[in-house]
Image (cartoon, rainbow, N blue to C red):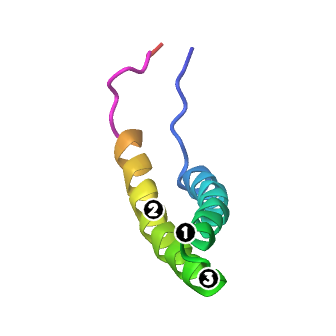
Amino acid sequence: MRTKMETRRRTLVKAVLWQVLGLLSMALVGFYLTGSAAMGSMIALVNTSIGFAVYVLYERVWARISWGREHG
């Protein structure tokens, strides 16, 4: 069985969808903690921007690591 490498496009789509979910949940948490929709949204945007960049980098690093993959 051949192991397929993750494409950059797939990594990007996964990251975007994950970050949309994170943005929504963080906005709700921010609103709950501050009582302000504007402040909650700002917290969510900053968190999502940082999380998105780190996630894409993390996935690309792991795509290059062969440890734990079965080659056939």
Give the number of the mark in front: 2 or 1: 1
Q: Is residue 37 above or below residue 47?
A: below
Residue picked out by circle 1: 33
Q: Name which residue type carries label 3.
A: Ser
Is residue 59 shown left or right of residue 30?
left
Q: Looking at the picture, how far across and down is residue 23, in whole percent?
A: 61, 66
Residue picked out by circle 3: 36
Magenta residue span: 64-70
Which residue is found at the position 53% from the left and 54% from the top?
Answer: 8
Q: Name which residue type carries label 2.
A: Gly
Residue picked out by circle 2: 51
* Residue contact between numbered discs 2 and 1, judged by CB atoms under 8 Å: no
Q: Looking at the picture, how far across and down is residue 10, in whole percent?
A: 61, 50
> How many C-alpha atoms fall within 10 Å of the one at disc 3: few (<14), some, or many (≥20)?
few
Q: In this view, does 6 lie above or below 60?
A: above
Q: Looking at the picture, how far across and down is residue 14, in whole percent?
A: 62, 51
Q: Earlier in the sequence, mark 3 or mark 2?
A: 3
| Mark-to-mark CA distance, 3 and 2 | 22 Å
| Mark-to-mark CA distance, 2 and 1 | 20 Å
